[in-house]
Amino acid sequence: MFWRGVLGYLPVNIVQALAGFGTIIVFTRLLTPAQYGDYALGFSVASLASTCLFTWIEAAMARFYAAEQGDEARKSLFATLYGAFATMAVLAPLITAIVVMSLNVSPGLKLAIGAGLASTVVRSLLRMAQERRRAAGQVAGFAVFDMAQTGGAFLIGIVLILVGLGGAAPLAGAGAASALCLIYALPGELRTAASGRFDKARLRRYAAYGLPVTLSLVMSLAIATTDRFVIAAVMGEGAVGAYHAGYSLANRTLDVMFIWLGMAGGPAAIAAFERGGEAELKRVAAAQSAFMVALALPAAAGLALVAKPLAQVMVGPSLSKEAAAVTVWIAASAVFSGLTTYYFHSAFTLSRRTTRLLAAMAIPALLNLALVLTLVPRFGLPGAMWATTAAYFIGMCTSIILGRTCIALPIPWGTLARAGAATVLMGLAVSRVPAIGGIVELGAKSLIGALVYGGVSLAMNTGGLRLQLGRLIRRERLEFGL
């Protein structure tokens, strides 16, 4: 199931990568640094609101869809969760009105926050329907709607920037694209919910599981967004735009990869655990973690090695210099964050001991707050980078330690050693390429890095690469009758 998902979700993540990079390339050129800062802050506020209101419901759908066996149980699952969603959705417009009316900020920032909050309900509703498809293994259905939403949000966002919405445009575009997708994605979900029965006992069980997940994600968002508000207070919205551009460049690149693996790995891990318990889970988890490490290490190192030419190509001239400096540190923090969120946190969610997940995230969140408040006023943007990287590293270590009290997930030490050695060799080779700047340097370093890492990894069978390539080749031969 994992490898089928890895291949099936690949087009989704290609579209996400293209749209993500396109967002940086286009939006940093069409928006001024201050407008891009408005967008970053509006996105942060909207993400926090969505997490607080709806994430516990999305998490319950993802975790309990496979556990609720039989038609009646599934119908009750739908009726209960969509009923809870409807209740929470009533609060969203009230929160939007109160927040926007009470803010004493620039009109552009107020508009961006309002647009982000207004789009929260439709975006979360689409994510809920998508979580059900992913849990059911409906790769094609998930892929179609995800690609439509991602691509549509990007294109509509450009149109809205051109008509003058400024930093609010990308957020409004994401909401509009989600609303269009819901026209086709939602009716079947609602029919199933209407045929079921709202169950208070189920709701309590789902909430007991999902609310700690929500609180832990609020802690994670605090790590990811607190620095922006402190930077805005200390240095202004233009500095937030530069920081967010570099942060997005590194984080979006690695996050797309981790989301791709999480799309495939999450349902596979749940199915393995429900089917065969911890023994089957550990077998599946070993393959997943090895593949993650084999991809994450060279990706992060590669981003750091090409940070300057990548920023020159991807980010607008007014933001590229500061963005390049941010990219190096955030690449490291994105690896720690991705491994934590999409692998080590599985120990808490699979065992349903999500209160320990909350504890695992509280420690790095509090540490990050203390470091940001201390370092940003003194060192500026570098202080925010150091704080974020330190917090995510401590968060990963905390999750490993506490997670082992729930389920001891395997750590792929062998793959880590081989991938580390291949990454070092890759770095040595890439460092020999002259720093001529721009797309030529970026292309040359990327090509050399990929060839060196790929060749060394294949020779050392990093992450079982030779085995998986052999299986893929045999499968293709069978399909074509060779």
Image (cartoon, rainbow, N blue to C red):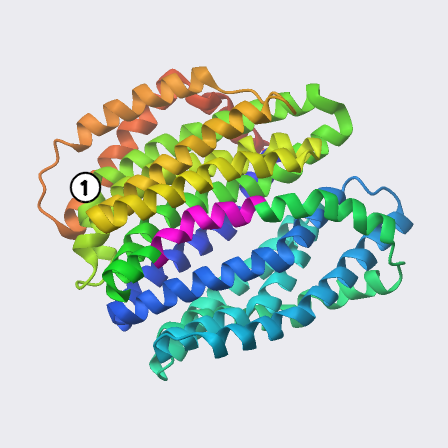
Residue 262, quarter of picture: top right
Residue at horizontal 31%, vertical 28%? 453
Look at the image and give the residue range highlighted in magenta.
216-229
Q: Is residue 246 left or right of residue 345?
A: left
- Measured from the top left, where is residue 280 in percent x and y? 69, 22
Q: Toward the viewer: 346 or 131?
A: 346
Residue at horizontal 19%, vertical 33%? 430
Residue type at tag 1: Ala
Q: Is residue 480 in sight in this rendering? A: no
- Measured from the top left, where is residue 176 in percent x and y? 53, 74
Residue 180, quarter of picture: bottom right
Question: Callout 1 environment at 10 Å: few (<14), some (14 to 19), or many (20+)?
Answer: some
Residue at horizontal 61%, vertical 75%? 93
Q: Toward the viewer: 432 or 369?
A: 369
Q: Is residue 234 left or right of residue 362?
A: left
The quadrant the C terminus occupies is top right
- Measured from the top left, where is residue 200 in percent x and y? 86, 53
Predominant secondary structure, magenta span? helix
- Measured from the top left, where is residue 339 in percent x and y? 47, 34
